Image (cartoon, rainbow, N blue to C red):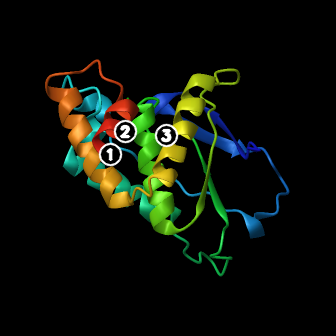
């Protein structure tokens, strides 16, 4: 499972690193990668899935792909078997949880690495409905042999539907209908 490696103070844009909480830790099999996300809460738009707009989706996918791609850092092992992640960009930056999760799924597929998604926003704030829906949707993608390009295009189209005329639609259901 996830292991706390640092102590921080503050929240949102005011978070600061205080100190490491693990004095001795075997980093030869792990590394921490920090990737920024779009500050979607600052974009003046009523669209509920701003990251599905083509330019934003391209930017976020490129960022995640670069972060997930194996690069030898400091002579370390570039062959990490999986990426442990969570609700990247969904807290202070106002990202859509399902859209951000799908961006990370696409980036992991492009980087040819496994994705381990941790649904932890707070100590006891797990959402079993979110994880179940995400797992079912990923199973659908695999069964239908959906490519990253197909999913990307469907996310843009679903985003247009949700932003323009039907904001109450479910993102995953909308994408699934477009891909079926």
Give the secondary structure at mark 1: helix
Image quarter hosting the N terminus? top right
| Mark carried by residue 138 | none
Circle 2 residues within 10 Å: few <14, some 14–19, many ≥20:
some
Q: Residue at x 43, y 62 (%)?
A: 65
| Mark carried by residue 137 | 3
Percent x, y of residue 180 = 34, 43
Q: Is residue 116 left or right of residue 42?
A: right
Which residue occupies the foreground of this view, 70 or 149? 149
Report, in whole angstroms, how far the alpha carbon at label 3 lies from the one at label 1.
11 Å
Report, in whole angstroms, how far the alpha carbon at label 3 lies from the one at label 2.
8 Å
Q: Is residue 87 above or below residue 104?
A: above
Give the secondary structure at mark 2: helix
Which residue occupies the foreground of this view, 99 or 80? 99
Give the secondary structure at mark 3: helix
Percent x, y of residue 88 = 49, 41
Q: Residue at x 31, y 28 (%)?
A: 41
Q: Are marks 1 and 2 in contact (CB under 8 Å)?
A: yes
| Mark carried by residue 176 | 2
């Amino acid at each position: 499972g996830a292991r706390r490696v640092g102590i921080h103070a503050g929240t949102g844009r005011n978070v600061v690193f205080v100190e490491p909480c693990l004095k001795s830790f075997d980093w030869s099999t792990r590394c921490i990668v920090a990737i920024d996300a779009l500050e979607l809460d600052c974009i003046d738009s009523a669209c509920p899935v701003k990251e599905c707009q083509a330019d934003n989706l391209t930017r976020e996918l490129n960022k995640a792909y670069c972060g997930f791609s194996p690069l030898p850092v400091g002579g370390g092992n570039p062959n990490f078997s999986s990426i442990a992640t969570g609700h990247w960009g969904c807290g202070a930056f106002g990202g859509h949880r399902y859209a951000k999760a799908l961006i990370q799924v696409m980036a992991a597929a492009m980087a040819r690495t496994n994705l381990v998604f941790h649904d932890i926003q707070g100590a006891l704030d797990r959402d079993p409905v979110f994880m179940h829906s995400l797992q079912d949707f990923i199973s659908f993608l695999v069964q239908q042999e959906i490519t990253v390009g197909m999913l990307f295009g469907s996310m843009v189209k679903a985003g247009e539907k949700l932003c323009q005329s039907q904001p109450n639609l479910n993102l995953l259901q909308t994408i699934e209908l477009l891909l079926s």
